[in-house]
Image (spheres, helix red, strand yellow):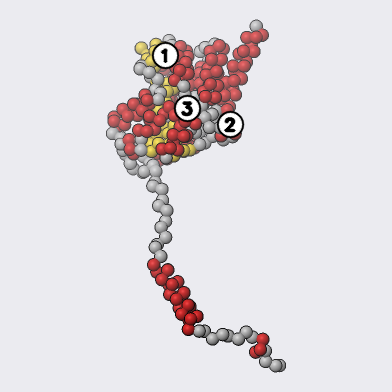
Amino acid sequence: MPSLGWFTRRRRPATARSVLAGEAAAEAARKSTQDAPPVEETPAEPEFPVVGDTAAAAFFDLDNTVMQGAALFHFGRGLYKRHFFHKRDLARFAWQQIYFRLAGSENPEHMADVRNSALSIVQGHRVAELMSIGEEIYDEYMAERVWPGTRALAQAHLDAGQKVWLVTAAPVETATIIARRLGLTGALGTVAESVGGVYTGKLVGEPLHGPAKAEAVRALAAAEGLDLSHCAAYSDSANDIPMLSLVGHPYAINPDGRLRKHAREQGWRLRDYRTGRKAAKIGIPAAAGVGALAGGAAAAVALQRRRR
């Protein structure tokens, strides 16, 4: 067979310049690997909550943070079922809940109306009676409305050995029941005056709302020997900015529009456990089921009046 050497490309002898280029490239490659700075890993996010930090605690707002809707509204539904008040009062409670949903924030005047409604209903009743009924109402209307995501956050603090408190404008008796049923440490809430174990229809001071929450947290921290810079607070409402600003770890949970904006400006962490298109609208709490029921109750009352 004839040689095919003619078909093979002839090797061109290396020139001095090509040898120099090859050696320079090899040297540059070795030098780049030797001189390259070590790859910096993104530092891991510090563990939080910190296990064993006894100077830390967590403070959770209740309405639309831990639980969908307003605790006081759910309590009112339970009392209506037990004939504590009339249909016109139910219509008022329903309207107040609808307003709460659509406004997306807690208006002080609106909260005062809710407070006065509740006080007029419990006036003359025994504290022990309302506590017993409150346990039943929790099972009927509240237990299924607890946000699993927020519940998990609270449990993380408990697992770290920290105390966890609810901080709410709801009556302290109602808040205490919810805290106990969730396995939390306790609750800070609005205190209604009672004499001889009977409600008078008056408050001790004012509702635990806005700045009053911050004062309650500050007082409890001092009594418990807590370091607020180690503590965490969770809320959905811009009205709780004073409380959130007190602690070293503020969280905006299912935030209304004002709190979402403030949290982003301040670099606070956000968590949103609402689902569905309505919840995606900033400023509208995701208590659709409650609102629908409230609206239905109001419509039913109005329809019955027309028929009379």
Question: Mark 3 or mark 2: which comes first in sequence?
Answer: 3
CA distance separating discs 1 and 2: 40 Å
- Label 3 vs label 1, nearer the camera: 3
Within 10 angstroms of label 3, few (less than 14), some, or many (20 or more) residues? Answer: many
Question: Mark on residue 278?
Answer: 2
Tag 3 residue? 63
Placement of the C terminus among the 4 image quadrants: top right
CA distance separating discs 3 and 2: 18 Å
Residue sitting nearer the eye, 240 or 153: 240
The answer to which image quadrant residue 230 occupies is top left
Question: Mark 3 or mark 1: which comes first in sequence?
Answer: 3
Tag 1 residue? 126
Furthest toward the front, the residue is 17
Furthest toward the bottom, the residue is 2
Q: Please, what secondary structure does the residue beneath circle 1 have?
A: loop
**Where residue 39 sits: x, y (%)?**
42, 60
Q: Are marks 1 and 2 in contact (CB under 8 Å)?
A: no
| For residue 245, above or below residue 49 | above
Q: Please, what secondary structure does the residue beneath circle 2 have?
A: helix
**Where residue 196 sits: x, y (%)?**
35, 12
